[in-house]
């Protein structure tokens, strides 16, 4: 999809989130897109490796803290998933016909969602 005619107004795009994770040396893999009504919906599954001396809950708590330090508090969360939303202004040259899913707008801004699974 050509994002040339969209202007990021608020939040982080999925690409910028991936860049921040790479810079912080946090390993992840991209999962299949989840079914949500957004023009872009990405899922990043953190590759949590933990020594036997640390339990998984404790390590998840450490990763939650790191993610919040990097990206700020999520727009919303559910169990062990953080959701970050980006909002885009559509320019006049944008071809809306390239959007095939059901999409969501917020005050006229197109919404992208990135889910981080901890």
Image (cartoon, rainbow, N blue to C red):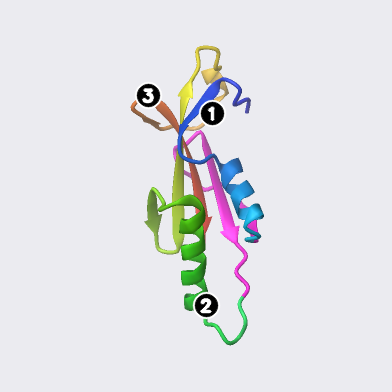
Residue 27 position by quadrant: bottom right
Q: Secondary structure at mark 2?
A: helix
Mark whose residue sits in front, 1 or 3: 3
> Which residue occupies 58% across, 87% down?
53
Q: Secondary structure at mark 1?
A: loop
Q: Single out the residue that lies furthest toward the left.
A: 107
Q: Single out the residue that lies furthest toward the bottom.
A: 53
> Which residue occupies 61% across, 77% down?
50
Q: Position of residue 86 (x, y in %)?
A: 47, 38
Taking the magenta stretch, the answer to whether it contains residue 46 is yes
Instruction: Give the residues drawn in magenta, as a range.
Output: 27-49
- Ranked by sequence position, the earlier of labels 2 and 1 is 2
**Marks 3/2: CA–CA distance:** 41 Å
Label annotation for residue 108: 3
- Ranked by sequence position, the earlier of labels 1 and 3 is 1
Q: Secondary structure at mark 3?
A: loop
Q: Position of residue 11 (x, y in %)?
A: 46, 39
Kindly identify which residue carries mark 2.
56
Label annotation for residue 100: 1
- Ranked by sequence position, the earlier of labels 3 and 2 is 2
**41 or 72, which is in the foreground?**
72
Residue 80 position by quadrant: bottom left
Depicted 110 relative to depicted 83: above or below: above
Give yes or no for contact between labels 3 and 2 (Cβ–Cβ under 8 Å): no
Depicted 116 relative to depicted 95: above or below: below
**Marks 1/3: CA–CA distance:** 18 Å
In this rendering, the count of numbered labels is 3
């Amino acid at each position: 999809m050509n994002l040339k005619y969209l202007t990021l107004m608020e939040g982080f795009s999925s690409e910028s989130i991936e860049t921040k994770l790479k810079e912080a040396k946090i390993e992840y893999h991209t999962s299949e897109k989840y079914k949500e009504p957004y023009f872009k919906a990405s899922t990043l599954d953190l590759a949590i490796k933990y020594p036997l001396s640390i339990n998984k809950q404790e390590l998840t708590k450490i990763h939650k803290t790191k993610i919040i330090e990097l990206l700020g508090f999520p727009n919303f969360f559910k169990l062990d998933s953080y959701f970050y939303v980006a909002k885009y202004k559509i320019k006049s040259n944008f071809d809306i016909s390239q959007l095939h899913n059901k999409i969501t707008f917020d005050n006229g801004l197109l919404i992208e969602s990135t889910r981080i699974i901890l």
